[in-house]
């Protein structure tokens, strides 16, 4: 964990399924980068929302 991290909900579409993943990151751009590293590049990120 880094300082200043927040929780984000990332909605991903892969193999005609939609999944929601919770990721800790500093901002939305960082959350997208972490999501791309965790999963393969063949997925499509639909949305990134800050979790309250």
Image: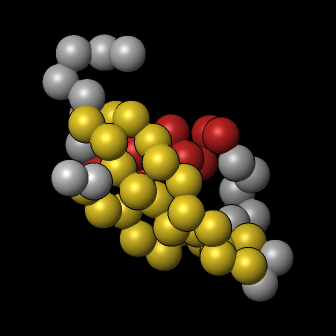
For residue 28, above or below residue 1: below
Residue 1: where, in percent of width, then height? 37, 16
Q: For this view, does 3 lie left or right of residue 36? A: left
Q: For this view, does 43 lie left or right of residue 28? A: right
Q: Residue at x 40, y 45 (%)?
A: 31
Residue 24: where, in percent of width, then height? 39, 35
Q: Residue at x 81, y 76 (%)?
A: 15
Q: Quadrant of residue 5?
A: top left
Q: For this view, does 17 lie left or right of residue 49? A: right
Q: Residue furthest right?
A: 15
The foreground one among 42 and 9 is 9
Q: Residue at x 34, y 35 (%)?
A: 25
For residue 31, above or below residue 26: below
Q: Quadrant of residue 3?
A: top left
Q: Residue furthest top?
A: 2
In this rendering, does residue 29 appear at all?
Answer: no
Give the color scheme: rainbow, by chain, secondary structure or one colour. secondary structure
In this rendering, does residue 1 appear at all?
Answer: yes
Q: Residue at x 73, y 79 (%)?
A: 17
Count of marks placed on residues: 0
Q: Residue furthest front?
A: 52
Residue 30: where, in percent of width, then height? 36, 40
């Amino acid at each position: 964990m880094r300082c200043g991290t927040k929780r984000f909900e990332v909605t991903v579409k892969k193999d005609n399924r939609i999944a929601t993943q919770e990721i800790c990151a500093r901002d939305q751009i960082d959350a997208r980068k972490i999501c791309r590293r965790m999963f393969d590049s063949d997925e499509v990120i639909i949305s990134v929302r800050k979790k309250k």
